[in-house]
Image (cartoon, rainbow, N blue to C red):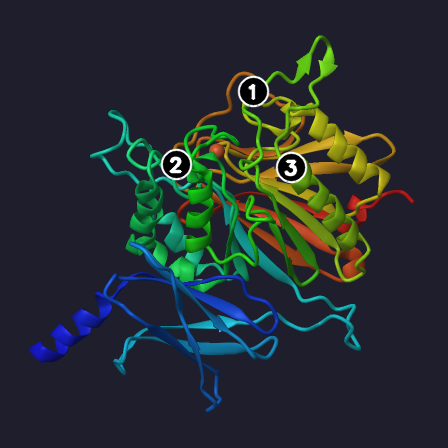
Amino acid sequence: MAILLLVSLDIQAQVISGPMIGHTDLRTSTIWMHFTNDVKEAKLVFYKHGDTKMQTSSFNINSGLFKTATALLFDLEPGSTYKYCVLVDKKKDTIKTGTITTQTLWQWREKYMKVPDFSFLTGSCTYFNEPKYDRLGKPYGNDSSIFESMAKEKADFMLWLGDNWYTREVDYYSEWGLHDRPARERAIPIYANLLKAMPNYAIWDDHDYGWNDADKSYPLKETSREVFKKFWCNPSYGQNNEGIYTKFTWNDVDVFLLDDRWFRSNDGTKDSINGKVNLDKKMFGNVQMEWLKNALLQSNNNNNITFRIIATGSQVLNPMSPYDCFRHYSAEYNELMDFIKENDINGLVFLTGDRHHSEVIKIERPGTYPLYDITASPLTSGSHKFGKEEKDNPYRVVGLEDMQNYSKVSFSGERKNRIMKIEFFNPKGEKQIEWSVGIKDLKSPK
Ligand SMILES: [Fe+2]
């Protein structure tokens, strides 16, 4: 018995964290792991629930000190559940198991008007205390049992909205430190159930990119991008080795994941000079904006898509925010708003994080439908009451202050009457507020 226990402990010791489910579409999925440095090779065996046919995939293990790894599950059937087992080196023992479910093929079917109902979880700002290196005083990180409540939710995926870990002085000056922070936190057991319960997608904001309010001048940005790629499994990461922006589709919803840091002018850059808008002040940069415009047009012309969600770290629309907000980048803000209006981009909603409170901001647009910015924050970091500038924000439709929270975004109903509902929950999983909008109310008049 004692020998068996030792063998089992030895196998478990080869896993630092994982499995985490990454990008999943109709016929493929990804599994992420972090192995100990002695692991030379690892395999994933997977099979359809109730089937005998086994398939095998090799983990692609990153070199260097942090052996994170991903394996692809391929040749899967849509709308099906698969079991998987992780094996390391030549050993025959399974070290981790789990299940994944692929997306449904509903497009262009006989009854394709019936889009599957689905939901996803979202939130931003995760801080775990490490007192040895943290600021003195009240710890910034709070109740991490929120991740256990989230793991129990029935949802199709989780979208991490940035500040997914907080690099600090001991981390953001070195390549090793930038790796060590997520490696250390990913291994905290309270995450485990959520990471393997559903696919995970992510964007970054300042704290998981670099230091507070980090911009395009952050000297280790290339390393940050490598770390992001090593710890998440998004479908792609920017273009030409720059940035981490990408897009994915879930049923009838396109999600545009923007990078608000890689190309960003410092927040202190003057927004206007001598009364004229400063054209050099950018949050997303020319290349990413060009990509976004094309991606929005492509999406707008796809009849199978109803809602378009632009997700980014900083708030986008809030006119009352004294802090980071795309609105303070007037040249690009106006450019994007004009583009959306001129091209009748329909069903568009913004989803943002960073603020340490949650709210829905509504901006009326003359001659067309209003835009909404849904902010979901914080998961575990400090929260606050609305400051005096924002206390009575006339643009706020609903708000949640001074409380850790996560959100669930659900889509239901037929395509023409599709409803998007957002619910905000406290760490115990108790609903605090909700808000919904119908696709009918997000249509250009034309
Ligand atoms: Fe932030």
> Which amino acid type corresponds to the residue marked 1 in the rendered image?
Pro
Q: Which residue is mark 2?
A: 381
Counting from the top left corner in percent of width and height, residue 189 is at: 29, 56
Question: Tag 1's secondary structure?
Answer: loop
Q: Give the mark, 1 or 3, whose residue is nearer the N terminus.
A: 1
> Which amino acid type corresponds to the residue marked 3 in the rendered image?
Asp
**287 lies above or below 264:** below
Label 3 Cα neighbours within 10 Å, binned few <14 / some 14-19 / many ≥20: many
Tell me which corner region of the image, top left, top right, bottom left or bottom right, holds residue 43: bottom left
**384 lies above or below 349:** above
For image coordinates 82% across by 55% down, the residue present is 301
The circle on residue 373 is: 3
For image coordinates 25% across by 25% down, the residue present is 137
The circle on residue 322 is: 1
> Which amino acid type corresponds to the residue marked 2 in the rendered image?
Ser
Q: Give the mark, 3 or 2, whose residue is nearer the N terminus.
A: 3
318 left or right of 128? right
Q: CA distance from mark 1 to mark 2?
A: 20 Å
